[in-house]
Image (spheres, helix red, strand yellow):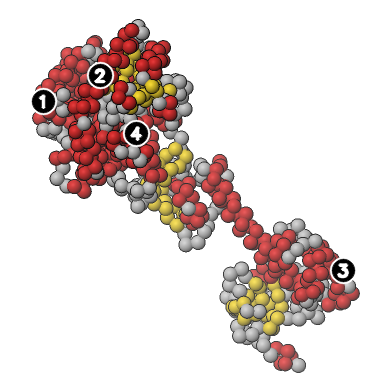
Amino acid sequence: MQHPLDINPDHLCQRLQQALDGMGERVGPDLALAVERLCQSVAQESRAAIGPRVAVALADVQADLATLVAALLADPALDESEGEDSATALIAARLGRQEQRDVQRLLEAIERLRGWEAGYPEPQDDGQREYWRRLLLAGARDARAVLIDLAYRLEGMRALGEEPDEARRRRFAGMTLAVHAPIAHRLGLGQIKWELEDLAFRHLEPTTYVEIARLLDERRTSRESYLVQVEQKLNHALLQAGIRAEVYGRPKHIYSIWGKMRRKQLSFEELFDVRALRVQVDSVTDCYAALSVVHELFRPISSEYDDYIARPKPNGYQSLHTAVEADEGKVVEIQIRTERMHAFAEFGVAAHWRYKGGGGGENPFDMQVESLRRGLSRGEIRPLAAPMVYAFTPNGELVELPAGATVLDFAYRIHTHLGHRCRGAKVNGQIAPLKTEVANGDTVEVLTHKEPAPSREWAHAKSGFLRSASSRAKVRNWFAQFDREDARERGRLICERLYRRFSMDAPARRQLLEALGVNSDDQLFLAVGHHRIAPETLQAAARGQLGAAADRSARPPREEPAVGEPLPEPPGGRSLVIENQSIDGLKVIPAKCCNPQPGERVMAFLSRSQGYKLHRPDCRNLAHLAGQYPERVLPVEWPGAEDRSG
């Protein structure tokens, strides 16, 4: 069989012209001539003539006109410098309006895919590899773009041996094996899948590849002779049963052989599918009838039987698989399928171009791939309504997000703390608002505050800041914790002021906890801070525990003074003393608004982060603070004030 790279470019263009002729009236003589001129132009620019090869491969599965033209125009070797007289311009002028749009969209999709593939970072993590497969599927938006990309990837693998740089060869082969071959498998493109795998394996594990190839070649004569005997015997039995069938040897794929040897820990001689036959029949009924003939003729190995007709694989693959002990006790693996099943196994979604009604039925299938398959089977260009999008971090890692997610969702997806600190983002190097939606392939850099500073508005779905419910839950949790800490601090200040007013020691505090039905100081602080226990209830409980002595020692609450009037000092109460610029271990700072001097009458306001701030009693700011936070205003004295007053 002639290798694809050995086919003359002129012959490729002739085959493409024949495919165009088969499209009938949709392709007039002017358009056919323009396509032929484009094919010749590409073939002359590139010795490998990749574009024509890809177009011919797609024509062999009855691809539509837009796909063939896009495949030619996507050739990197194409020279666009000929202006209005170029083959590209001539084709564009002769295509219908819808086909022009189709070609343009396909070319844009292929350009996107190639741009992402150029930045492939060779991830070692299986999760990242899976994200790359999903990115290419979701980002293509049209199954035909994926098929064109896979066809170009296959041509690149066939010619990879000409690349002198080993590192580039290994990188290209590594991405092919990790990303493109699994995509081909999901689309059911068996023929492309196995060739991509074998070619990639040849460059990544050359020693193992050569050894398996040698073992296959050494035993080829005896194996083929044996299979001819089994094939003739099976053909005769099927004919006797009145079943029209074609029986032939099944190709051996080196990568799949190696994978099965490693997975099942078998030697080469122990593999079943080294000796393999395929039986192709006319109908599903004939499949089961042929299976019955096989099992009557040879002893079946029950553990190796799989019915993929009744239970198709997720990618839509259907066939009957069995293994039997044939002549001389040797194991032979046999696959039984219809022509339609075989076409799907080899060409996958592309087979829908030949079999318009075919498909995998109601099989569970990945949503993205199923959408691509449906669009392809109808010959439609339709945007892929993927449920997820995939965006890059600045270091090249992919992040999976729900469709419609914002850059703020992106930050929360990476880490909760990063989301809390997010103040903005750069998308593809450009500053973007927090509500900016992330698209497939975007590179998002999160800009942050030094400290967490989320907004309560983020937690509301209608605000548009966060698409993900989990991200909104993280915001709500942060504010719940913040409010809890704020309530605890507020309750602590109220309780400690009460303790000082009533001169409550540790046993008295424990009695107070019991009277209020709480188990710890922390629970009391939270209950008071959340207003579940009112200050009046707290004071009543204290008086009930301490009796009349508490009434005599307690200072009555002071009324809020008018702004500008000096705050009255509490009668009979003890003032805290400023010692070494601190009170009870907290720093003391003179307030800038009134700047009290040592020795002057002062009041202290307990701030949340800067300790005590000293104010003059007639300070307007202090009067305002005392009205909002009376529990934080405390009487204080400078050291030695009592001696001076005496």
The three-letter code of the residue at mark 4 reads Ile
Q: Which of marks 3 and 4 is in front?
A: 4
| Type of amino acid at the residue the image marks with label 1 | Asn
**Residue pictured at 17% horizontal, 36% vertical:** 159
Counting from the top left corner in percent of width and height, residue 54 is at 21, 27
Residue under label 1, please give it. Answer: 8
Q: How crowded is mark 3: few (under 14 residues within 10 Å), some or many (20 or more)?
A: some
Q: Earlier in the sequence, mark 1 or mark 4?
A: 1
The amino acid type of the residue labelled 3 equals Gly
Q: For mark 3, what is the residue?
A: 544
Q: Distance between the residues labelled 1 and 4?
A: 30 Å
Q: Nearer the viewer, residue 190 or 168?
A: 190
Image location (x, y in percent) of residue 456: 58, 51
Q: Which of marks 4 and 2 is nearer the N terminus?
A: 4
Packing grade of label 1 (10 A; few <14, some 14-19, many >=20) is some
Above or below, comparing residue 444 to residue 559 in the picture: above
Work out whether 641 lies above or below 258. Answer: below
**Residue farthest toward the right in the current orientation of the protein:** 548
Q: Depth-wise, is mark 3 or mark 2 nearer the camera?
A: 2
**Residue 229: mark in rendering:** 2
Work out whether residue 165 or residue 9 is closer to the camera in this orientation and state it: 165
Do the numbered discs 3 and 4 sit on residues whose CB atoms are within 8 Å?
A: no
Residue displayed at 20% across by 29% down: 220
Label 4: element kind? helix
Image depth: mark 4 or mark 2 in front? 2
Q: For mark 3, give the secondary structure.
A: helix
Q: How far apart are marks 4 and 2 (CA)?
A: 38 Å
Residue identified by numbered label 4: 183
What's the distance in space between the residues labelled 3 and 4, CA to CA? 77 Å
